[in-house]
Amino acid sequence: MSNYKKDFVDVITLNYNGKDSTAKLLDSFKDVGFKNYEIFIVDNGSSDGSADFLEKNYPEAKVIRSKKNLFFSRGNNLAISQTNSEFILLINNDIIVKPEFLSKMVERIKESDDIAAVASKMLLQDHPSMLDSVGVVMAKDGSPFNRGIGQPDVGQYDISEQTFGACFGCVLIRRDLYEGDIGPLDNQYFGYFEDVDWSFRANMLGYKIVTEPEAVVFHAHSVSSRKNVPMWKFYLIQRNFIWTIQKNFERKRAIKRTVRRYQYILKNMQFWPGKKDKLQLIKLIFVTLFTLPSTLLKRFNLQRRRKVWDEYIFRFSQNEYPFFEDINYKPVFTLDNLEHALKRIAGRDEKTRELHRRIISLNKEKEHNNNSNWDSEVKDLINDLVQNKVIDSSEKQNYIKDMVEDRIWDNS
């Protein structure tokens, strides 16, 4: 600890042919109130002149050039190895920050030495009244998702809480734990699950990851990954998912979930008609089997230090659900979404309780309505929700379209 710059933050972001997005991020930092920070940009072998542009226009930031794309884990680990502040902020280059976000995160992480990381409140840039993430949770089958994703931000997550993990799109980490007991991001990963794997490790070893709802940032959800071909994305997600299960889950659950994941991959072959795609799926299974010895070694070194069991870790996902379309990259505007969002704040006042009751009632009737009365009542409800500032007026038509016009809840 004595070698670290106390109360300072190393801000690290990665750039790959994204100078415009990175510039917007850096511009938003100019109004940040907390000043004890330095910015480091890892340019992952960009071909668009990003490194020169950023060095010229943002001399306050240090650009670390890589000749090739190191992806997420290796890129961040490279920058971390060249810095020495007490805290590390990992932040995506497609994020815009609010001025007070960093001071709030630093205040929160300093509350206790067993807080390994702090998760910010991330809102969607395309839907700034809607949540992207207030931490991450993991279901018992190992499936992770952003806590609160797709929900209207009505204050339901405005109390700092312990959660399973943080979305590493914007996370503040305690360096001594990152370089010590918990360890760094696994360099074998790239693309997906790096933050899930690290968060599981932190939980297993008895550390806490907490949310800081006053640390608000706006995220252009998965902008860069939208350009990737579907099979490439599917391959990375499933491969890293299997590695995470094999390394972190208790033995019986790890075996069971690995087998089920292989079954899922084989079942999905029918949906990938191309020969190359099918070969990729076969390769995926062989790669995770071929790397099993090294994965088991990591597992042994980790499991022998375990302090917390899986059931405790999975409890954070109780009553949490994602409301987001991964394909169209937008929230799911349904009564289920509204019911879940208001459930946590229904006791706030009588008006909120009444709106919540109306949502529940209409939600129960949705499968059986066969006239225009239901549609009319839903529209009236949406108008009242806008009037009471439960949902933003800019999202009004999205709710009407999904619930009344498209009836997406009826698509199975």
Image (spheres, rainbow, N blue to C red):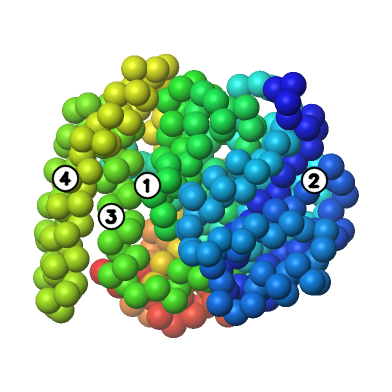
- Mark nearest the camera among 2 and 3 is 2
* Pointer 3 or 4: first along the chain: 3
- CA distance separating discs 2 and 4: 43 Å
Name the kind of residue labelled 4 in the image. Answer: Leu
Which sits in the foreground, 224 or 163? 224
Q: Residue at x 39, y 58 (%)?
A: 364
**Which residue, given by chain and number where applicable, does mark 2 sit on?**
37
**Image quadrant containing the N terminus:** top right
Residue on which the image places disc 4: 289
Q: CA distance from mark 1 to mark 3?
A: 14 Å
Please report whichever mark, 1 or 2, sits nearer to the chain's N-terminal start.
2
Q: Distance from label 4 to label 1 (Cα)?
A: 15 Å
Q: Which residue is mark 3?
A: 238
Residue 302 appears in view: yes
Please provide percent x and percent y for residue 52.
70, 73
Q: Amino acid at mark 1?
A: Gln
Who comes first in sequence, dot 4 or dot 1?
Answer: 1
Query: Could you tell me which residue is drawn at 42 percent across and 25 percent down?
Result: 204
**Mark seen at residue 188:** 1
State the CA–CA distance, disc 1 to disc 2.
Answer: 29 Å
In x, y percent, where is residue 23?
A: 73, 70
- Check the image and report above or below for 304 versus 232: above
Earlier residue among tags 1 and 3: 1
Tag 2 secondary structure = strand
Label 2: few (<14), some or many (≥20) within 10 Å?
A: some
Residue 140 place in picture, x, y as percent:
31, 38
The three-letter code of the residue at mark 2 reads Tyr
Q: Quadrant of the C terminus?
A: bottom left
Residue 181 against residue 158 in the figure, above or below: above
